[in-house]
Amino acid sequence: MFDEKKEAIAFATIQLVDFYLESVQNDLQSVVEWIRCMGRKLHLLSPQKPFKILTCGNTFVSGEHGIFIKPNQDKKQIVKQLAKAIVAFEKDISKETIDAFMLKDFVNESLFITDALHSVGYNSFNVDPNMMLTLDDNWNTFDDYLAALKTKYRVKAKKALQKSRGLRTEEVTIDSLKQLLPNMTLLYKNVSNKASFNLGYFNIETYISLKENLKDDYVIKVYWLGDKLVGFLSGIKNQNSLDAHFVGIDYTVNKSYAIYQRMLYDYILLGIDNNIKTINFGRTASEIKSSVGAAPQDLTIYLRHRKSIPNRILSLFLNRIQPTEFRLIKPFKTKKV
């Protein structure tokens, strides 16, 4: 976006996503069925075609990764203008009609700006929160992190680390990645198929270009049990933050070897070793992530159908979406003042 002097003042990254209503697997299924019925009666939804969403933001990483605005600008006005520009841009990027437009993952501190989207027809809703861990400046080693935990959770961590000692870990290079991709894809699907709501499926082959371009700032670690690949984690070093990306798990040995718990602790170790300030663990598995110290960060998504009547139907669906309830655990000792 340019100002009247033709100087760039903002940009937005956009992605075209094919969303299938059938991918919803939780208590929203009855609502989805109602929407499907209404959509067909009104000739708004085709059973053969996916729901095409033009998304501003990153479909595969939680957080504000969609819009950058230069300082000292009227942010409310720019967000509204960008929303309109994204709608106008649809003809340039797709031969098929876009069904809806989405701007995703705004933190609560941004809502006084982004709520301006309501005036241009967008509906807002929240899904599961992003789980964020803030690393203490005094954690120079993983033992420092363990010492900060209450006894119960320190014992739990040590037990998980003991159970996972039978695993062999390995940092993945570009050369080894190409050989590992088929098995990694199967492990990723194990995890993604358990999700109750998927906006899109990640193509694991993307790891090659991520590793080639981001080099050491993109981390992939694999977990072996003997000669069998049983898990992997991936993450992006993003300035002072570490964004946990996708993981893959062999659930047949997950409990006996505490694979997922070990991954969470390995993310924390990565953060400490790289002087990271915050770890963005993403959505899902909120309770176990809170047990290692992560706290929920609410994120708001804005969605609008291109036509007014379907947009009203869509708003009814979105009003039913509620974040999954979970038990928030606070595993750290209370700091002495």
Image: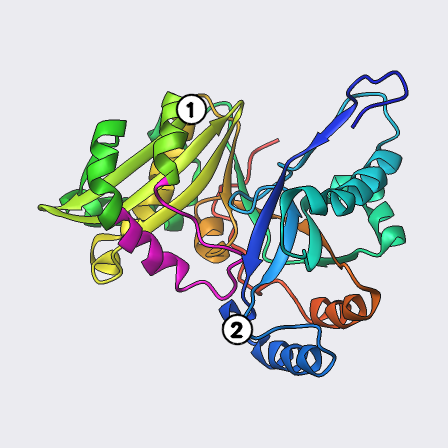
Quarter-wise, where is residue 213 in the image? top left
164 vs 244, nearest the viewer: 244
* In the image, farthest residue toward the front: 95
Left or right, 241 with reference to 65: left
First in residue order: circle 2 vs circle 1: 2
Q: Amino acid at mark 1?
A: Leu
Q: Is 309 placed above or below 136 here?
A: below
Magenta stretch bounds:
184-205
Name the secondary structure under disc 1: helix
Q: Quadrant of the N terminus?
A: top right
Q: Amino acid at mark 2?
A: Asn
Q: Which residue is mark 1?
A: 214
Is there any visible trace of residue 270 in the rendered image?
A: no
Measured as percent of width and height from the top left, residue 102 is found at 69, 51
Q: Which residue is mark 2?
A: 26
Measured as percent of width and height from the top left, residue 52 is found at 61, 58
Name the secondary structure under disc 2: loop
Residue 192 magenta: yes
Quarter-wise, where is residue 177 in the image? top left
Query: Which is closer to the viewer, label 2 or label 1?
Result: 1
